[in-house]
Image (tube, rainbow, N blue to C red):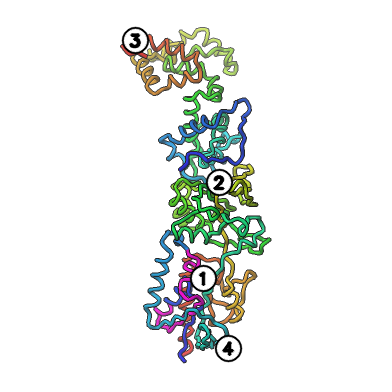
Amino acid sequence: MPAATKDPYLKRDHVAGHSDVDRATKERLISQVMADSRFGDYLYGCYECGICVAACPSARFYDFSPRRIAQAAARRDVDLMFQQMQEDIWECSQCFSCLRCPRGNNPGGVITIMREVAVKEGLHSAKDALAGYSRIIYKIMSTGTQVSPDMLQPDAFPDWGPEVKDVSENLDLWRRMLPPETMHTTTTGWQVADRTLVELYVIWLETGALDMIAQVDQGIHMILEEIMEEKLEEEGIEI
Amino acid sequence: MQERVVVVGGGPAGISAAIAAAELGAPVTVVEKNAYLGGRPIEENYASLTPYLESAEEVMGRLIDRLTAFDNVDILTSSQVIGKSGDSRPFELDVLTGSTATKLKAGSIIIATGFTHFDPGRETQLYGYYEFEDVVALQDLEAMLKEGKVVRPSNGETPQRVCFVQCVGSRDRQIGNEYCSKVCCGVASKEAIEVKLAIPNAEVFIFYIDMRMYGYWESQLYWPAQEQHHVQYVKGIITEVLPKAGKLLVRGEDTTMGRPMEVLMDMVVLSVGMEASPGTRKMAVLLGVEQNKYGFIEAAHSPLDTVSTSVNGVYAVGAALGPSDLEDCASTGGLAAAKAVRDLHALV
């Protein structure tokens, strides 16, 4: 089976805000998607019935269609798939309501694979999509926790009411009122043991998650590498 | 002269009817215009039959063997019914075999004269069947598959991109055939699978209005074609075929993607539908049975009696009644045989 159709029906190379890339690059990216071991279980054949779109919450708010994702992949349409990697896949909320497909397809799963390839390859769209998450990425990857009490600033959450101000002014005190000692923290969600951190850092390294970050945000990558290096060296592990 | 069940036509439906009548003990005569039995599948060199992809020659061969094994069956090949006298049972039929005329006393008659493939020269689109060598019809590709040689007729090369265009001559008010020909979706899918098996690197497309894969054809043909053989099903009908740089440019709309398409093909296969065969039209007139506006024989008491015609003692089976698959041929054949043999007994 050819990996890609040689002659797309309609050549629409340009996506607003993203420069086009050459055909060979597109084919390389898409063949990565289709070579993924999950791909065969995520896409059988498409009836084009639209039940996935009917079930999709994102489709109600964006010009987004899981059917088009499934169709483009089923047709091995490299140009359209590349265009979708630059736009559509970031409009999916990954809720997998599309799993109600009568053919057993998983358009959301195809999107998962496409996103992974987009991030690994440092696609412009992936950088854009993840830009708003740099603080969260930094926090999770460096501390293992996402939301920390010191993020609860009254300015940031005015809709939470006047008590946020009181809590944030006496944060340490409020935290120490919690029964579990491991939650007497303000800069992390809970106390993270050194051993846990080292294990997490090894996971980021071994799974390539750290390399993915290098593709989308070099600044954060440098900071993370520095933090991890120190901890890992103590354990005799070299980055 | 002994009264017999006379079956006109020796294809899948006619043979099925003749076997069933013979099994019920009736004397049977099969009148077949060709020099051989087997009907369309043999006459048009079908490679295999839908949906099991079994060799048409083998399947029909087994059926013919069963028929010829009966002592109470006469088979008149190269023969045609040319006249009838008597308005009610028993009928006297004039049969011409070569230049020899004989008479048959028919206690009942089963019309099994089948269909003919729609002539793509009559389609309202511009597919160029008679203009471009690489535009072929389903049965032309069958013959290639049977020979084991799927090549572009224009240059003998192996086609890398092949497309099927569905509903050619069917579901078309302009042509006058408003009906669905029932089997072409399955046959095209079967042939698409066979093309992929013969040429694994080929890209195969099926352009359709609706895919009508009723019953088990869904999982026997449609899903395997799509999932295992990666046949591309595109909802949208081709409006015209144009020559371009030694290939064929097909123009249509990819409707579910909402975009126009112009794609180059090495070979275009027209999924031609069924029309009443000249034999069916001729027999309807000769035996005085009512036809519908499409020339097929009208089943007078449908839906639960699929074979009785407007004339008592005359039945129609298979594609003489309208678009039919092989299962229809076998089941209408069996039902008509039961009724035809009953008529014979009623005369006694």
Farthest residue toward the left?
Answer: A236
* Picture disc at residue A233: 3
Report the front residue among B261 and A17: B261
- Which percent across, then down, holds residue B42? 47, 68
Viewer-nearest of discs 1 and 2: 1
> Mark 2, residues whose alpha carbon is within 10 Å: few (<14), some, or many (≥20)?
few
The tag earlier along the polypeptide, 4 or 1, is: 4
Residue topped by disc 2:
A49
> Mark 3, residues whose alpha carbon is within 10 Å: few (<14), some, or many (≥20)?
few
Marks 1/3: CA–CA distance: 82 Å
Q: How many numbered markers are drawn?
A: 4
Q: Are marks 1 and 3 in contact (CB under 8 Å)?
A: no
The tag earlier along the polypeptide, 3 or 2, is: 2
Type of amino acid under label 4? Ser
Residue at the image position 43 percent from the left and 34 percent from the top = A36
Type of amino acid under label 2? Cys
- Which percent across, then down, holds residue B199? 45, 49
Instruction: Specify whether residue B29 is painted magenta.
Output: yes
Residue at the image position 42 percent from the left and 66 percent from the top = B57
> Mark 4, residues whose alpha carbon is within 10 Å: few (<14), some, or many (≥20)?
some
Viewer-nearest of discs 3 and 2: 3
Could you confirm whether marks 1 and 3 are on the same chain? Answer: no
Residue topped by disc 1:
B318
